[in-house]
Amino acid sequence: MKARSSHIVPIVIGLCLVFGSFIFSVGFREMVLRALFPATRELIYLRTGLPHMLGEHLSLVLLSSVLASIAGFSLGVFVTRPYGREFLPLVRGLSSFAQTFPPVAILALAFPVLGFGFRPTVAALFAFGILPVLNNTIEGIESVDASLIEAAQGQGMTPGQVLLQTELPLAAQVIVAGIRTSVIINIGTATIGATIGAGGLGTVIIAGLVRNNTAFVFTGAITAAGIALATDWLFSRLELVFFNPQDGVRSGHDSTRHSS
Amino acid sequence: MIEFDRVVKYYGTHRALDGVSFTVPDGCVTVLIGPSGCGKSTSLKLVNRLLEPDDGYVRVNGRPVKSFAVEELRRGIGYVIQSAGLLPHMTVQDNIGLVPRLLGRDKAWRRARARDLLDLIGLDPHAYARKYPSQLSGGEAQRVGVARALAADPPILLMDEPFGAVDPLNRETLQNEFISLQRKLKKTVIFVTHDLDEAVRVADRIVLLQDGLVIQEAAPEELLGRPSNAFARDFVGTDRALKRLGRFSVSDYMSHDTRRVGTKDHASVPVDATLREALSRILAIPSDEISVIDAQNRTLGSISLEAIRRAGCGGESS
């Protein structure tokens, strides 16, 4: 692990430098785009700066993902508690049904109610982002060996202690994977927000589509892809730090059970 | 003392326990045994209230378990389960220190206690304290499971097929370790197993269950010597006389007359062996008598086939 990451670090730093220059230095961006699209006259979208659009994009994603993670996680914990368990089949069914909805449809449904702009986009991203977190929270908690939970109860843990000290630590990796999926999906989906005036990187993409300007589309798309990759990489680092394979959470303790 | 008083437990419409009454004396190992579905594990879980009875009472020292706060009750009862049930995200010492932590003991105390207990169960504290359960063998995990149950020094231990997931060779080692540990600690133990040999080895008393009913409650010698009905007779098996000999020690049945021992063969049996072992050794030699030796190889006397037969027929030791 150590040897591999020491190779990766300079590459990552290099990529960050290139990517940062592309976003923040108009001159560098123009140079790159000119090399890629020599036939295009207008290379730089002038109405809004790229850093500004990136900022809008990130605040859309951050707000909706934080809310979605809190909601998905809380709902997932609720339906796996004894008092919420009767809702489990309902919630499971609804969430797999909802996942078949394309995000554009949710956006289309949201804006007549919430109007144009930032809020309906956050609402749509929030609704869509809940599902991976919810699903993974349920699956993560449900996959904890029932005999382990009984062992924890048998040692005298209160229900809260069983949740915090047994179920959540053992489900954490699956839950974090759900948050990761949710955030990555939201980074891509947030570009659609521009269609209803939420700003973000979708602005330059749509401008490019309207004016048949590939350089604009490329600018927005590569930036969104870049932050998606960066976020994914950050999450993978996070998992390595928090879920060291050494501590056996990954391998678990396999048990052979006989009923009696 | 733990009492079961006409305890009834349903699973849906299935009557898992059908009015079970028995007592578990202090400082003894009481084994609950019977075929699958007889209600032995169910009975055990009624004591620490992982299950609640539908009727009847379970009492600890005369007080119904219902009247205890459930977490308090459980923290005062050691609980050992099959395949140990160690929490995989905690180190061995944190697993052992779990109940003391729930009881509010500080870190230094828990560390010291974990180290003492690892010593007690025969695992090197330096090598094992910081390991994770996935790094332990089945037998080691099971020992740590016992250590965890002992950590808060509870007077009562519940053991639910504690050695059931361990291979036969290690199981016997664990059983012997448990027996010598229990000799020191004198806990009140309820031990669930479906393995009669294990029951005979570790039990002071055996409660035989079938379909949620107590068939016989007796000392192992009595259960093997006088099974109370056809089911009990079938359960203890056709070699029950042989199993029963495993309960008796050579030292109680030997003759201390050293002159009687012939020197025609060098076969001998250790004085702390069981009559079952002595019988096996006599059958391998042409004589009806075998010399009894101590740990220093000194001849203490002899034991005869006749003495073993008398013990096996139910004659009390003289």
Image (spheres, rainbow, N blue to C red):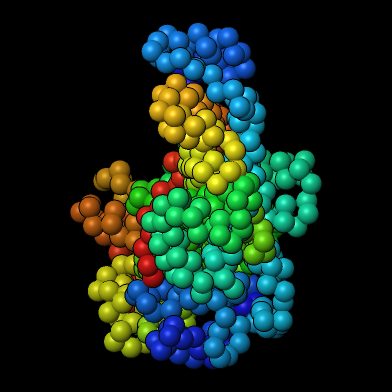
Residue B20 in the image: state x and y as whole percent: 50, 87
In the foreground, A115 or B39: A115
Residue B118 in the image: state x and y as whole percent: 61, 42
B35 to A13, vertically: above or below: below
Residue at position x 61%, y 13% in the image:
A25
The quarter holding residue B93 reads: top right
Q: Is residue A152 visible?
A: no
Q: Is residue A103 visible?
A: yes
Residue at position x 58%, y 36% in the image:
A200
Q: Is residue B26 left or right of residue A193?
A: right
In the foreground, A132 or B279: A132
In the foreground, A244 or B305: A244
In the foreground, B235 or A183: A183
Residue at position x 70%, y 79% in the image:
B61
| Outermost residue to the left | B286
Residue B85 in the image: state x and y as whole percent: 51, 54
Residue at position x 51%, y 43% in the image:
A195
B59 to B185, vertically: above or below: below
Residue A110 in the image: state x and y as whole percent: 54, 57
The quarter holding residue B13 reads: bottom left
| The N terminus of chain B: image quadrant | bottom right
- Total number of numbered labels? 0
